[in-house]
Amino acid sequence: MDKSNFGLFIVATPIGNLKDISERAIETIKSADFIICENPKHSLKILNKLGIKKKLISLHDYNENLIIQRISNSLSNKKIALISDAGSPLISDPGFKLIHYCTKNNINITSIPGPTSIIPALQLSGIPINEFYFAGFFPKSKKLMQDFTKQINNTNKTSVFFVSNHKLKQCLELLETEFANNSISISKELTKLNEKVFYGYGKQIKNIVLREKENLKGEFVVVIEGNVLKKIQTKDLLDYNNEIIKLLSKFSLTDVVEIVHKLTNIKKNKVYKWVLNIKKS
């Protein structure tokens, strides 16, 4: 008996466009004894489109331990597929406890990779993505928003996170006040017919998105440029020529002088001469 045919198979499903599902994902779902999913009603729609009928078991944050107990005996002799409502399971979705149980009990586990909204949003952002920080979902409370902002500001890497449509306006306000000088992209309804990407700085992006009411509908992924301004931490301007050059590509000479002056406390006339020389060169 080939044990690799049994166990838990983590299967990525489309985030919008059904054509994005892989042949391997379809084969795995078809051959599974049953499927663990987030929302059976949602998953049933996908399975119906694929012409697949399978038993569905709902898994969420409040019943995960119970489900593990229920299927524990089946994990070693049945083929079980784990899917989420859309995209790659476990990314801000339930399932961690189940995976942890499998790894601790020597249960065969594998991943059938596929769609995720994170990578397309980064690719479409026009922002460097050689390094990035995934911040999860935009928080619900003001207290958590403060912590959320702090975490993003504590990294100079590009940051990416999800935001639901009913929290989008609050998110736009935070971007306007806390990330005014950062390049930002907001991807809407990725891979779907209404896919759209908005670009701008934090101080502009709110007005750009709010131009049309239709822009507020759907699911969103926000990408924020790392904070190059934080790199200017000493009074030695020579060490920060690259950062000043980047600022000059985005802001006027006057604005750059003001930014550098505030961050370094160096006299404005000295900063002005330094920045002017860089601009002329």
Image (cartoon, rainbow, N blue to C red):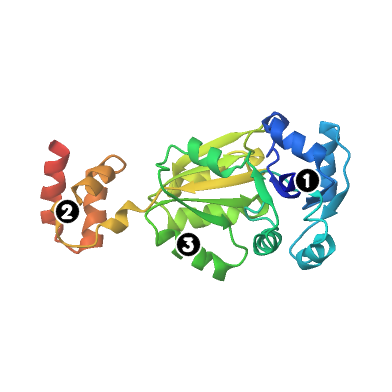
Q: Which residue is mark 2?
A: 239
Asked if 93 appears above or below 215 in the picture, the reply is below
The residue depicted at 50 percent of the width and 57 percent of the height is 174
Question: Label 3, label 1: how many angstroms apart (C-alpha)?
Answer: 52 Å
Residue 176 drawn at (x, y percent): 47, 53
Residue 160 drawn at (x, y percent): 51, 50
Q: Are marks 1 and 2 in contact (CB under 8 Å)?
A: no
Q: Residue furthest bottom?
A: 143
**Residue 256 visible within the image:** yes
Q: Which residue is mark 3?
A: 149
Residue 91 drawn at (x, y percent): 62, 52
**On the picture, is 245 further left or further right than 149?**
left
The kind of residue on which mark 3 rests is: Thr
The kind of residue on which mark 2 rests is: Asp
Question: Label 1, label 2: how many angstroms apart (C-alpha)?
Answer: 64 Å
Q: How many residues crowd around disc 3 within 10 Å: few (fewer than 14), some, or many (20 or more)?
A: some
Q: Which residue is mark 1?
A: 1
